[in-house]
DNA sequence: AGATTAAAGGATCTTTTTATCCTTTTTTAA
DNA sequence: TTAAAAAAGGATAAAAAGATCCTTTAATCT
């Protein structure tokens, strides 16, 4: 479904959101341990999220990553768009160059329904809400 | 969503199904033209479908590919399983090693719903029915 | 100021996916 | 029975994704 970059990015940003909600700043080292991801690779992903202003990075000793108050309302759809682009929201299920209801592929009508459900789900799920679940120990980020 | 192999494979098998329903046998050359896919690569994909008995291949002059009567009821889910495996039906959306409702990732409950809808759609959509749409010129396989 | 810490950036390497090319096998028809 | 057609199979190449390593920049504390 999502690329490895995107999977790591989602796990990372959800973890940062949870820690931010507890007033903690977290380092790359901590993040990659807590979400069980390759550290150097995760660094690259976090750089993209930083450049796109979804997380804030702080250099130097006692540095790390946090999410600014207003960015806690960021939706998963936005994170995915930054890391994987929006093919998942707009692309044809059978790989036609573009999805177009006026000359649909055989799967179009069935596929669009699912794709829209996915999109709605991702556009209505915020970091804030997932961070809360995580704080309540209802969910996990590594296994 | 799907790999290139899988996209080509789905387009190809749907096209073969349509032609079979009109009592035509089709060659690789025709297939790759009609679905606009790289020919040699599509050959490999068709070999997999042939080995897995989803399509029948006939060598020699006047050879090509057809789908046997009873295989017209093949569901898309089966084609996808052969070409991409079943991660799409069973894998965790955030990339945890396995998806498990007893210790779910933050996305689990929301994700499983979509995943199941996708699965149900794919398990209930047969080659036969898509071939029919295609015959009625309701849909296309290249653009 | 100097040492240390942690993210950013650049370069490189590995693996997987996507794609092509060439030879072999099977079948058909002249 | 030979030539041609078409799929199968094997080898290789190119591109993309995934991953690592090392240097640079910025911040903090002594
Ligand atoms: S045209 Fe294929 S999904 Fe819309
Ligand atoms: S555990 Fe992540 S989707 Fe089920």
Image (cartoon, coloured by chain):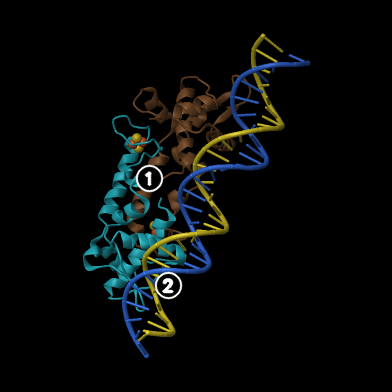
Chain colours: A cyan, B brown, C yellow, D blue
Q: Position of residue B46 (x, y in %)?
A: 55, 34
- Residue hosting label 2: A29
User: Is residue A29 visible from the viewing direction of this image?
Assistant: yes
A34 above or below A80?
Answer: below
Protein chain holding label 1: B
Q: Quadrant of residue A104?
A: top left
User: Is residue A136 visible from the viewing direction of this image?
Assistant: no
Q: Position of residue B22 (x, y in %)?
A: 46, 20
Q: Which mark, residue B118?
A: 1
Task: Answer yes or no: disc 1 within 8 Å of ligand 1.
Answer: no
Please state the quadrant of the image where ligand 1 appears. Answer: top left
- Residue drawn where x is 51% and y is 26% of the image: B69
Indicate which label's residue lies in the foreground, 1 or 2. 2
Outermost left residue: A70
Label 1, label 2: how far apart the Cα atoms are: 37 Å
- Residue drawn where x is 43% and y is 49% of the image: B89
- Residue drawn where x is 29% and y is 72% of the image: A20
- Position of B50 with respect to A53 (left or right) is right
Q: Quadrant of residue A91?
A: top left
A24 above or below A100?
Answer: below
Q: Secondary structure at mark 2?
A: helix
Quarter in which the C terminus of chain A is drawn: bottom left
Protein chain holding label 2: A
- Residue drawn where x is 32% and y is 52% of the image: A81
Badge 1 and badge 2 both on one subunit: no
- Position of A101 with respect to B118 (left or right) is left
């Amino acid at each position: 479904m999502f690329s490895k970059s995107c999977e790591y990015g989602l796990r990372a940003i959800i973890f940062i959101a949870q820690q931010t909600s507890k007033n903690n700043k977290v380092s790359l080292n901590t993040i990659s341990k807590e979400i069980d991801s390759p550290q150097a690779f995760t660094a690259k992903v976090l750089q993209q999220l930083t450049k796109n202003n979804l997380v804030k990075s702080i250099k130097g000793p006692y540095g790390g990553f946090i999410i600014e108050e207003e960015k806690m309302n960021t939706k998963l759809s936005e994170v995915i768009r930054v890391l994987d682009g929006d093919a998942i929201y707009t692309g044809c299920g059978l790989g036609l160059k573009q999805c177009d209801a006026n000359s649909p592929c055989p799967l179009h009508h069935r596929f669009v329904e699912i794709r829209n459900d996915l999109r709605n789900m991702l556009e209505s799920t915020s970091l804030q809400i997932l961070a809360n679940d995580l704080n309540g120990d209802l969910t996990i980020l590594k296994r």
